[in-house]
């Protein structure tokens, strides 16, 4: 999340003095999604007030009714980069974030101040911190009137009293608060961000420092293969293997490919599949997500670049276009700037815009009919859907088109808005996915070769994933056979490639054996250059961080990741006095004079901190001689500056990445979610063999994707239902029958909050039925719930990938402490 909570009174005083106009006061009404919003400026005047149209609690509202999409578009410029004061900010923050995600819009950078937290600091002995209680205790007034409970829970009314409460709190700030802040600033140690913490690239769309002399020949070889595919008259796809041990930089090399070639080529990144029944659809879903990524330093997505280039070539080759004045003018504009396709065809919702896009669509579909010699099957309809996605700029229509392209069945009124034919509930998603990938491959023949990268595949070699590996082998055979003009890359450990060949078709193996790229072991000079580049990020030299012995120890590690991890350990020891891991043994007799001086200085600093903390914490009359060592804590600061659990540090860093990913367009599927749950449960089975995993049946009727977890806590059924339209109600109805017929089992059904709201009467009724049972519950998976779920899954995958140096047994030991009361861990404990 791009937000910050500011709850320190001293910090706020500085904000008020410097930027009074940047403060706004906001209140939301609603449970998970916005129902009403009120916003005031720093003087308490109303800037905005609206109610969400069609919300069941707004039936009697007649003014200021707007769609959620319209409200979000209107409030974004008001709240962006502002300091937002709320009472119980956590609730308002959740409502804002969920509502932005609901309409598939990125949440802007926000800063929150919570008057509940500020009140607790100012009045620690109060019985309550509700707005009504505080307003009455402090005799606050709005327009000469005291707080009246019957007017509460109106967004503007509550925002006005929050404004008065905030003014009261800031006026009563005393000078001690400011002095404390100034003292903290004066005596705080100089903080350096640890430049070595990012020791791995999670996906190629990230941005990490890149020492380009490393693996330069390997990068150029990939470029040569792309050139061969482009020059091949048949545009036959090729495979390539990037072979390297864990932490050698396989994904980093792909990141370099992305940053150097993304404006020209389209890079599509696919993480490990987790469901044997949907490997092709998983691949296509990740391809769509990659297509929705912006090209670095540009305003258009990869998909828009592909479409602009290929459509221009198609139209330029059509006699129906080139022989008309209208067509010639269009082609002239497009050849000057391919991307003008998205802004020179008229304003959306005008006849000019519709006529131009209908003209383009008609000619593109005609070209496709000639190319394919027919217009049947999925392919021509998929192409039409791609055109519709590009012709719309309004967020709500573009979102509908994205969901349609993902093969989702939509509500009838949704498909009517974008003028497409609805998919059926029994759509063969594997067949559909292969055809869709093929369409993109054909379009790329008029652009540049696609780069399709399968990464994080090591977990497929585990015994429990044997069936997924078989399906993966079949899937890549279909892709390399039927999808043209593509470089298909597999990133693998050496031993995994040996294993995978036994499961792949021999003809497929031959296609990949033609281009095997082994990443060489880096020498110490190259590794030192990587450390130097990282250290420059915080304006430090290696000599500022390491002694000679520490640097030598760091460079002796076997992979880039291990070198960076060891460098991070030494950095934390040097600048934050965090104890070194137990495996680091320093022989003091080998220190040169400079190292001994550094050690002595560090020790004196530690002694000073211990004494300082002792004087602050203990009674001043107590003699210092009473301080004794426990025998476990040397002068490393273990007691005064405890080392952070490495697992928790990993989870904190990963969580930040997942929060950023949550903002992006994602294809959410039941098959993927159930695959993630299965991966988590199978990992837990390695430490708790008595755990059983099963599935329920209801004859031949379709049920939501689900798993039954059987352990000492009983039987818990976890299900996912992210589909919409008629399929949702039918599956949920069947699920409800299971719930009623199994009263001793507990049922939880999750739906991602970003998915469309269920508006059909039957679907709403089935949700209500489930929530009215004693053993069933319908749960919206909000941002925090989703990120926690993904965090556990990614930890397990990273352990299997050997991307982190943890063992699976830690998930049972430490995860409950980190996640506290997370529902899944509560079931598994």
Image: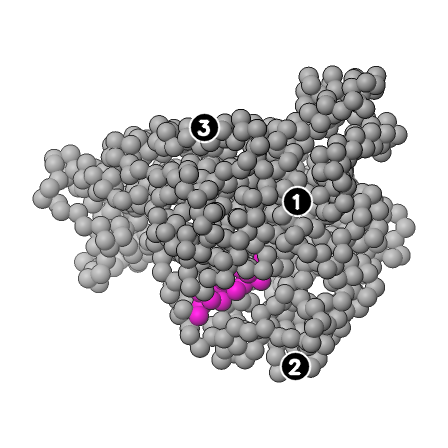
Residue 811 % position (x, y): 42, 63
Residue 525 in the figure: left or right of residue 399: left
- Residue 436, labelled with which disc? 1
Residue 90 in the figure: left or right of residue 637: right
Real-space Cα separation, disc 2 to disc 1, in angstroms: 41 Å
Query: Magenta span covers which residues?
Result: 672-685
Nearer mark to the viewer, of 2 and 1: 1
Q: Disc 2 marks which residue?
A: 742
Q: Disc 3 marks which residue?
A: 224
Q: Is residue 773 visible?
A: no
- Residue 426, labelled with which disc? none
Residue at 29% in and 32% down: 526
Residue 468 % position (x, y): 50, 59
Residue 154 vs residue 805, the one in the foreground:
805
Q: Secondary structure at mark 2?
A: loop
Residue 489 % position (x, y): 47, 41
């Amino acid at each position: 999340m791009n937000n910050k909570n500011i709850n320190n009174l001293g910090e706020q005083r500085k904000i008020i003095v410097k930027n009074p106009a940047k403060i706004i006061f906001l209140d939301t009404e609603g449970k998970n999604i916005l129902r009403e919003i009120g916003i005031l400026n720093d003087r308490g005047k109303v800037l905005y007030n609206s109610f969400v149209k069609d919300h069941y609690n707004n039936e009697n509202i007649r003014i200021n009714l707007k769609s959620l999409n319209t409200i979000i578009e209107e409030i974004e410029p008001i709240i962006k980069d502002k300091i937002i004061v709320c009472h119980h900010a956590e609730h308002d923050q959740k409502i804002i974030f969920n509502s932005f995600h609901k309409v598939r819009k990125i949440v802007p950078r926000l800063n929150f101040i919570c008057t509940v937290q500020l009140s607790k600091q100012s009045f620690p002995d109060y019985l309550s911190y509700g707005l009504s209680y505080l307003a009455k205790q402090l005799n606050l007034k709005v327009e000469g009137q005291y707080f009246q409970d019957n007017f509460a829970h109106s967004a503007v009314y509550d925002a006005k009293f929050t404004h008065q409460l905030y003014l009261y709190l800031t006026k009563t700030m005393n000078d001690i608060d400011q002095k404390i802040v100034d003292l903290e600033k004066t005596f705080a140690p100089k903080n350096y961000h640890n430049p070595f913490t990012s020791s791995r690239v999670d996906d190629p769309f990230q941005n990490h420092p890149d020492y380009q002399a490393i693996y330069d020949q390997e990068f150029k070889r990939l470029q040569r293969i792309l050139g061969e595919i482009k020059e091949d008259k048949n545009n036959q796809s090729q495979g390539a293997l990037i072979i390297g041990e864990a932490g050698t930089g396989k994904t980093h090399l792909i990141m370099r490919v992305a940053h150097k070639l993304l404006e020209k080529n389209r890079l599509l990144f696919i993480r490990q599949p987790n469901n044997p029944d949907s490997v092709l659809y998983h691949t296509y879903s990740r391809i769509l997500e990659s297509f929705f990524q912006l090209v670095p330093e540009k305003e258009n997505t990869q998909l828009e670049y592909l479409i602009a280039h290929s459509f221009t070539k198609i139209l330029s080759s059509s006699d129906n276009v080139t022989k008309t004045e209208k067509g010639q003018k269009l082609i002239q504009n497009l050849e000057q700037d391919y991307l003008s396709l998205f802004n020179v065809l008229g304003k959306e919702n005008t006849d000019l815009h519709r006529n131009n896009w209908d003209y383009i669509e008609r000619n593109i579909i005609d070209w496709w009919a000639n190319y394919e010699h027919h217009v049947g099957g999925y392919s021509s309809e998929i192409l039409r859907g791609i055109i519709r996605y590009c012709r719309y700029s309004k967020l709500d229509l573009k979102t509908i088109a994205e969901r349609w392209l993902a093969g989702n069945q939509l509500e009838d009124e949704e498909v009517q808005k974008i003028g497409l034919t609805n998919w059926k509930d029994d759509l063969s998603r594997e067949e559909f996915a292969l055809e869709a990938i093929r369409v993109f491959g054909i379009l790329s023949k008029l652009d540049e070769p696609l780069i399709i990268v399968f990464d994080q595949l090591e977990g497929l070699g585990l015994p429990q994933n044997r069936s997924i590996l078989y399906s993966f082998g079949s899937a890549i055979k279909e892709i390399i056979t039927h999808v043209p003009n593509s470089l298909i890359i597999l990133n693998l450990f050496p031993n995994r490639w040996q294993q995978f060949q036994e499961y792949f078709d021999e003809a497929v193996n031959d296609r990949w054996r033609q281009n095997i790229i082994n990443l060489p072991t880096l020498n110490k000079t190259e590794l030192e250059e990587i450390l130097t580049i990282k250290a420059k990020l915080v304006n430090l030299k290696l000599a500022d961080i390491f002694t000679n012995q520490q640097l030598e120890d760091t460079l002796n590690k076997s992979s880039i990741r291990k070198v960076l991890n060891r460098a991070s350990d030494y950095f934390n020891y040097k600048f934050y006095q965090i104890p070194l891991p137990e495996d680091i043994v320093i022989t003091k007799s080998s220190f040169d004079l400079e190292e001994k001086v550094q050690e002595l200085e560090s020790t004196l600093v530690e002694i000073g901190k211990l004494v300082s903390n002792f004087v602050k914490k203990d009674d001043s009359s107590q003699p210092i001689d009473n301080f004794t060592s426990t025998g476990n804590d040397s002068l490393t600061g273990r007691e005064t500056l405890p080392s952070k659990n490495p697992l928790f540090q990993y989870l904190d860093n990963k969580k930040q990445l997942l929060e950023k990913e949550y903002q992006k367009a994602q294809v959410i599927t039941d098959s993927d979610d159930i695959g993630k749950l299965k991966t988590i449960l199978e990992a837990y089975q390695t430490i708790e063999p008595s755990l059983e995993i099963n599935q329920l049946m209801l004859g031949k009727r379709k049920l939501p994707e689900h798993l039954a977890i059987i352990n000492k806590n009983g039987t818990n059924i976890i299900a996912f239902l992210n589909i919409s339209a008629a399929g949702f109600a039918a599956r949920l109805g069947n699920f409800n029958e299971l719930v009623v017929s199994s009263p001793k089992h507990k049922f939880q059904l999750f739906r991602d909050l970003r998915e469309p709201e269920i508006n059909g009467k039957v679907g709403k009724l089935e949700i209500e039925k489930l929530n009215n049972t004693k053993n069933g519950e319908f749960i919206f998976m909000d941002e925090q719930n989703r990120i926690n779920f993904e965090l556990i899954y990614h930890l397990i995958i990273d352990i299997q990938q050997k991307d982190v140096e943890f063992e699976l047994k830690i998930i049972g030991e430490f995860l409950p402490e980190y996640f506290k009361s997370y529902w899944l861990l509560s079931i598994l404990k």
